[in-house]
Amino acid sequence: MKLGVLLNAEYPAHELADLGRLCEDLGYDQVWYTDIRLFRECYLGLAAIAAATRRVHLGPGVTDPYSRHPAVTASTIATLDELSGGRALLGLGVGSTGFRELGIRAVQPVAALRETVDVVRRLLRGEEVTVDGKIVSLAAGKLQFRPVRTHVPIYFATQGARITELAGEVADGIMIPNTALPSAVDFYLDGVRRGAGKAGRSLDEVDIALRFEACISDDQAVAEAVMRRRVAARVAASYGHWDYLERLGVALPEEFVRIAAGGDLRRAADAGHLLPREAVDRMVLAGDPGHVAAQLTPALRPGVSRLIIRPHAAPGHPIGEVLTRFVSEVLPRVRQEVLGQTGQAHVSTTGG
């Protein structure tokens, strides 16, 4: 099982470069960097990581078809691939953060992602592309330089059923976020499998990653407090699109629903204490290494090929501590638990 990291667009360039080197040294083979409107610019950050590393693959985690035109994305990802010596990845999702401020509406997401994949891949192959799709339009567009590679791996990040199936059909990989409940993981794996079958592919042709936000601390209460705020903000940000909560068996109290409906994410984060226990246990990793390993192990199923973590530090601790402890303390415990359950080692990693 391979390892990846998702870093939020909040670090100055020099700190981001240091984190990229640390990830590479620890054995993570992917570094994703969030593309969020009005945060630090994603592709400049990725360029800083590329300049500071030699082996790790890197890309936006994730960009969207609405705030960046897919043709511009194709040009940008080809440039990153050139800069990094063929290490670029392209993460795609529906997006939402910052859309209200920019007046953007994420409509027809399945069509938008399908059309984006088609346009990006054709442009990378050197084609002149004209499309008049449901979302994407392009008139005789053609890259004005030769890409290093004609195929950059494309990953989707989603908790939506239809986009999960589309990932199995057209993407190279999928990142399934915030899902530690085994039945929910199985739901997404079945969706990828159906999509792959439509394209005449098998499940093992898609890199399937479970992506968790994690705070690793010996103080369980502190770790849970950090992640309760984070879960509350994420859930509130997706207000109106809560099908994934049903799959996770998470029911929200009415008081929190009213706060989420108000759209104030800071207030929602402050109301994290209202969330039920299962919201933390089934969506994020929080606690000491033993507790985190116990949360994580049941979610590992045949077909899952990668783990990606987005680290959150306990107050007063560096973010690199979470990255290091995940490899050196959590993963060995995961291996031990899997061995104890099955009698055979079907979990191994590139790190640790």
Image (spheres, grey):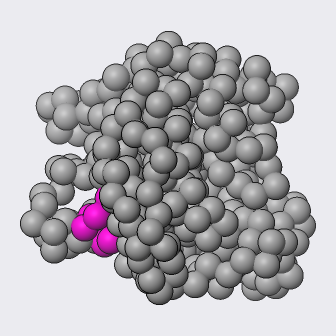
At horizontal 39% and vertical 56% (from top left) the residue drawn is: 123
Return the residue nearer the eye: 253 or 164.
164
State the residue at coordinates (32%, 71%).
166
Q: Tell me, yes or no, whether the highlighted magenta stretch contains residue 169.
A: yes
- Position of 197 relative to 9 (above/below): below
What residue lies at 61% left-to-right and 34% top-to-bottom? 46
Residue 19 at x, y percent in the picture: 64, 22
| Residue 331 in which image quadrant | top left
- Locate residue 239 relative to residue 283 in the image: left or right: right
Give the percent coordinates (x, y) of residue 146: 40, 39
Q: What percent of the width, then of the height, locates residue 138?
A: 49, 72
Place residue 251 in its image quadrant: bottom right
The magenta region covers 165-171
Residue 225, position in %: x, y? Answer: 77, 48
Question: Does residue 319 appear in this view?
Answer: yes
Q: Nearer the viewer, residue 31 or 241?
A: 31
In front of the other: 31 or 180: 31
Q: Is residue 300 above or below residue 30?
A: below
| Residue found at the far top of this picture | 25
